[in-house]
Amino acid sequence: MRHRRKGRVLGRSPSHQRALLRNLASALMLTERETEAGEVGAAKVTGRIVTTVAKAKEVRPLVERCITIAKHGLQSAELAREFASTADRNSSAWKQWRESDQWRKWAQASAPVVVARRRLVRLLGDKKAARILFEKIAPRFVDRPGGYTRILKLATPRLGDAGPRALLEFVGSGPRPDKGTAPQVQARRPGRSAGAT
């Protein structure tokens, strides 16, 4: 019996499930990297991957958690910038800053940033994906409280096994329909007639 055992098994052992989700999440982050036109392995559309519906539903919480961790790390990075030195490394001004109380404040303020980066590397298993998450993706969602991704089901199934496919993409990426295309209908409350006041 599978009482109280959450999540989809996806036909894999637990370690294989974790590796699959980790790879899907890092693949979604890596679509945001800068690539040259025609480069092998370059994403056709940034911020979007195609996978099965079940895998997309399973990886979505991991991606959302990673973005939230990176957002909290960005807040700490802003605090640490106040105490940072602008001098070149190993210069006399930098060495003086390194011995001052400002450096201790900077180190204390930047500690959560280091913890967040290490936690993301552990969750994603890819340093490049963690760096892209900090530099490009998290600043985009600073003002958004959650719901960073969406799942769009595709009409055509996967060739070979006819598995239902879906797009997993970041909100705000890709083409969006015009707001004026859908007709605006005012809904009436049930149980009221048109003439009642």
Image (tube, rainbow, N blue to C red):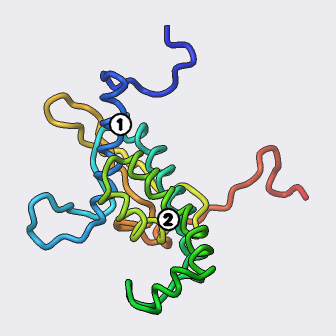
Residue 113: % across, % down: 51, 64
Residue 41: % across, % down: 14, 58
Residue 91: % across, % down: 39, 90
Q: Which residue is mark 1?
A: 55
Nearer to us in this view, 92 or 150: 92
Q: Quick one: which residue is furthest to the top in this view?
A: 1
Q: Dot 1: few (<14), some (14–19), or many (≥20) neighbours within 10 Å?
A: many
Q: Residue at x 14, y 31 (%)?
A: 160
Q: Residue at x 30, y 65 (%)?
A: 32
Q: Dot 2: few (<14), some (14–19), or many (≥20) neighbours within 10 Å?
A: few
Q: What distance separates the C-alpha of mark 1 from that of mark 2?
A: 31 Å
* Residue 193 can be seen, yes or no: yes
Give the structural element (helix, strand or loop) at label 2: loop
Q: Residue at x 10, y 66 (%)?
A: 39
Nearer to us in this view, 74 or 45: 74
Residue 105: % across, % down: 62, 74
Q: Is residue 37 left or right of residue 73?
A: left
Residue type indicated by callout 1: Lys
* Residue 75 can be seen, yes or no: no
Q: Which residue is mark 2?
A: 182
